[in-house]
Image (cartoon, grey):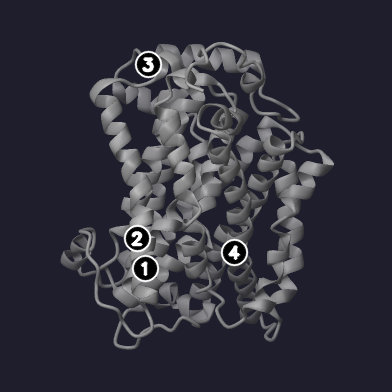
Amino acid sequence: MNDVPHDAGLDDLQRGLRMSAPPDPSHIARESRWLDELDRQPLHRRLRGWLSLSGPGYLQSALTLGAGTATTALFSGAVFGYALLWVAPVAMALGVAMLSAIAHQTLSTGMRPLPAMSRFAGAPFAGAWAASSLLASIVWHVPQYNLAANSVVDLCAVAGLAGVPAIAASPLLLAAAIWLSWSYGASPRLVRRYEQFCKWLIWATVLCLLWVVIHTHTDWRALFAGFVPSLPADRGEHSAIEMVTSGLAAAVGVNMVFLYPYSLLARGWGRSHRGLAKCDLVCGMLLPYALATSLMTVAAANTLHGEEVVAKGAAIQQMGMVLGSVLGQTAGRVVFDLGMLAMAFSTISLHMLVCGFVAMEWFQCPVGSRAYRAFTLLPAPAALAPAVFPSVPVWLAVPTNIACGLLLPVTYVGFFVLQRSRAYLGVDRLQGLRAFCWLVVMGLAIAVPIVSIGYYAIARWL
């Protein structure tokens, strides 16, 4: 495999993402020339220019800031206080490092990543990546509907419509998600507007949680100590290693890894966008995620942590008390429900989008075709989750996180192989100390979830 010349016989791999309305080549050419000129400017000017074009990183934040992240952050704070604040930043930093390597590979070669992985890393890696992305999107879909539907029910109760079953909200959520996911590939303008919506959603969540932290008592010494990795003692039915493993898995999922390079290609990005892509990951993904999860954990610690341990079967009204002490019980519930609904719904639509992208690559289905749309519906049975798992309206995301975390390391190994492939990267293959540092970080991103899940399995079953 490694004896294939870098520029030989790769036309099929370099056709790019199949979009029903691809970006305007003349616009991309102008943007690329501007970025090439920007690369010669001082750092502060480069950052300002890059931030004006950000987008795919926020799309990843919208995908990961769903039921899995929210549940883990809320229960971590409610049960263990500030002790597990370190988990989310560490997990996302490792994920961003891996995604930066993926961006370098994709934008340097211009190749669609799935067939590129099949050719240069091996068909088993590519098949495992595609199948894992589908499976993770289907499995992770379940807690999203549980959280979203129960949020709708609680909003109805606040409005005086008590007794509405959670399953009644699922058809509305499913219909809206289908419309949004099927519209994604219709035009670059719609893609940009959707990413802009995700951007505002993320920062609105951050500001809301910041308001709670400011207006509640915060033990700053304990808070800063919480960013130092440690494993607190178990409390009641809650295991610290279970929360750590869930947090590590929630930060970056295998379906996110699938979506990310294709979202770059959907924007028409190329070699000139490599610096922009790294800035976008840090500012659009790492910082919002670290802020949102940390503030959510601190807010839960300040309002829910105490002598009585929050049970795994806690209803969404109990978790809504995170905002109740500051905004009032009614207003707090409404704002909390809307925030949880927005995070879960954005993740629902993006899970469907990932399934469509897998169909596009695995079965050569054009975006918008009947087969493509059929694949986006694969996670749809998760709409039944509120009826199947009524006793764990919020907690369900934690075991789901751990299950999906098992699917990520093999895909990471495939990208590790690609990072070392001269046949794939050619002159863009990193050399020397820089290459060594990247491989070390990528190795850590592979090893950490394996060690965490192994430790959890041993603690849980032995």
Q: Earlier in the sequence, mark 4 or mark 2?
A: 4
Q: Earlier in the sequence, mark 1 or mark 3?
A: 3
Residue with the mark numbered 4: 144
SS at badge 4: helix
- Mark 4 vs mark 2: give the one in front: 2
Instruction: Count neighbours of disc 3 (C-alpha within 10 A) and say few if under 14, some if 14 to 19, many if 20 or more.
Output: some
* Residue 289, x across and y down, in percent: 41, 51
- Kind of residue at badge 3: Asp
Q: In the rendered image, which quarter is residue 325 located in? A: bottom left
Q: Which quadrant, please, contains the C terminus?
A: bottom left
Depth-wise, is mark 2 or mark 3 nearer the camera?
A: 2
Specify few, some or many for label 1: CA neighbours under 10 Å numbering under 14, 14-19, or 20 or more: many
| Position of 111 relative to 8 (above/below) | below
Where's residue 321, x and y in %? 44, 78
- The secondary element bearing badge 2 is classed as helix
Q: Which residue is mark 2?
A: 452
Task: Identify the residue at image location x=39%, y=41%.
Answer: 96
**Which residue is at a point 55% across and 79% down the rendered structure image?**
392
Q: Is residue 280 visible?
A: no
Percent x, y of residue 194: 62, 42
Q: CA distance from mark 2 to mark 3?
A: 40 Å
Mark 4 and mark 3: span between their CA atoms?
41 Å
Sequence-first tag of 2 and 3: 3
Q: Which residue is mark 1?
A: 456
